[in-house]
Image (cartoon, rainbow, N blue to C red):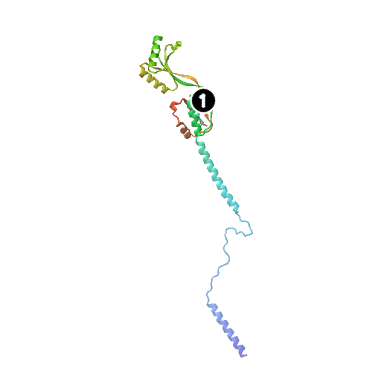
Amino acid sequence: MKWLFLFVVLLNAAFLSWHSFVQDQPEQNRESVYGPPVSEKIHLLSEAPAVTEEDYNAGVMSNDDLVDALNKVVEKSAKAKETFLCPRMEIEHQSSLKEIEAGLAEMGWSYDDNDITGKRPKFWLYIAAPETPEKARDIVKDLAGKSIDSFVINRAEMKNRISLGLYSSQARAEQASQRIEKLTGYSVDTYEHLRNVPLHQIDIQQPVRPADWQVFLSRFDLSKMMIKIEKNPC
């Protein structure tokens, strides 16, 4: 019995000691395992997301398409503002035609060549008729001695005039007139008129940029070519 009583006393002492130890420990705050409510919807793994990857890619592609469309509009507007030419040329001399055809080939431009007839200004140089046919013939001999070709006209309205030649360019006609007057001392007159002549009509069959057209024309000395140019807009 003594041993039992002693065991109970020791057990009570141990309990009191443990209880006193627990009371001395500070109380620790415990965080709640529950969070505050949020505005975003929580999806379970088994549920489909509100925005899929396909939806995102579709949005990106739509933006790219919009940018491409805007670029095309800007490019089309820029082209619309730029004027293009569809030039036409009317060429009188065969030598000028060959030069033009060679230039067109170098530029890589296609064209049509049509034979037409058109009026062109001509400049006839002559010396006024003297009093008699004999004096007219003497003038022709005098001119021949200075290497100047001429002949006497026998038609009624121009009888005894001395013809000095027909020129297609006013500049060349003026140069020839000044040279003859200086060599011979005779006064030279000029008669300007229109005459029907055969022509080659060249139509370029593709739109041409104005800058490219200027490059093409810069190849030639237009002052020496009997050529009419029309810069028609396409």
Q: Quadrant of the N terminus?
A: bottom right
Instruction: Indicate the secondary structure of the residue bearing disc 1.
Output: strand
| Residue 189, position as x, y percentages in the image | 40, 17
Q: Residues within 10 Å of mark 1 (few under 14, many from 20)?
A: many
Query: Which residue is identified by label 1?
Result: 200
Could you tell me which residue is drawn at 57 percent across and 48 percent down?
Answer: 61
Classify residue 105 as left or right of residue 42: left
In this rendering, the answer to whether 22 lies above or below 69 is below
Classify residue 183 as left or right of residue 32: left
Could you tell me which residue is drawn at 51 percent across and 37 percent down?
Answer: 79
Residue 75 visible to an observer of this rendering: yes
**Residue at the bottom extreme of this rendering:** 2
Res. 11 image quadrant: bottom right
The amino acid type of the residue labelled 1 equals His
Could you tell me which residue is drawn at 60 percent across and 86 percent down?
Answer: 7
| Residue 3, position as x, y percentages in the image | 61, 89
